[in-house]
Each structure stands twice: as C-alpha cells, then as structure tokens.
Amino acid sequence: MPKPTVLTPDALAPVTTTPPAATTPRGGARKPAAVPSPKPVPLQVRLPRAEVRAIKIAAAEREQTISDFMLACFHAYMQK
C-alpha cells in the first residue's frame, strides 16, 4: 500500500511539459516559411433545382469541382 503524501500547494500545482512533437527539430536547416494560402470561406446560395443540375453537369464536363467552376464563372463575369 502506498504511503500517504501531504497535500501542499506545490504538490497540487500542475506540471507543464512541452511534448517533443511541439518542439523544433535539432540541427539541420529549417524549412522556409510557406506563404499561407487564403482559407476558403463557405458561401451558400439558393438556386432552382434545374439550374443546380445544369451547374453540376457543366462542372463535371470540365472536370472541375462545383466551387472551382463557380469561381471561374465569377471571374469571367467580373472581366466583362
């Protein structure tokens, strides 16, 4: 049976250690900082079912995601 210990403020204080994965590797060259790409933000629109189907078909024909297709359409519209 373990011996009881006295509960002092020092014994109750949490021990903070840094996990090895959170530290930088020793030696060697560091990787150059990558330029962060803008994080996509969700956008919702309500469209008639027939137009949604047409958009999905057009995106699939061009082997694009719907988001990429709609972004390309937006940029083309803004160029005019």
Image (tube, rainbow, N blue to C red):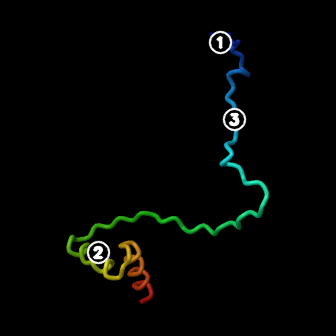
Q: Nearer the viewer, residue 19 or 1?
A: 1
> Residue most toward the bottom?
80
Q: Which of pointers 3 and 1 lies earlier in the amino acid sequence?
A: 1
Q: Is residue 62 above or below residue 5?
A: below
- Mark closest to the chain's N terminus, 2 or 1: 1
Q: Amino acid at mark 1?
A: Pro
Label 2 SS: helix
Identity of the residue drawn at 68% across and 10% down: 3
Q: Nearer the viewer, residue 53 or 63?
A: 63
Residue ID for mark 1: 2
Q: Which mark is residue 16?
A: 3
**Mark 3 Cα-neighbour bin, 10 Å: few <14, some 14–19, many ≥20:** few
Where residue 16 appears, x then y in whole percent?
69, 35
Residue 70 in which image quadrant: bottom left
**Looking at the image, which is closer to me, 36 or 43?**
36
Q: Quadrant of the N terminus?
A: top right
Spot the residue most to the right.
27
Neighbourhood count class around disc 1 (C-alpha, 10 Å): few under 14, some 14–19, many 20 upward: few
Q: CA distance from mark 3 to mark 1?
A: 25 Å
Residue 7 placement (x, y as % from top left):
69, 15
Residue at left offset 71%, top offset 65%:
31
- The image shows residue 27, relative to residue 9, as above or below, that is below
Q: Residue at x 41, y 75 (%)?
A: 68
Residue bearing mark 2: 56
Quarter occupied by residue 61: bottom left
Mark 2 in CB contact with mark 1 (< 8 angstroms) = no
Q: Nearer the viewer, mark 2 or mark 1?
A: 1
Residue type, numbered disc 3 = Thr
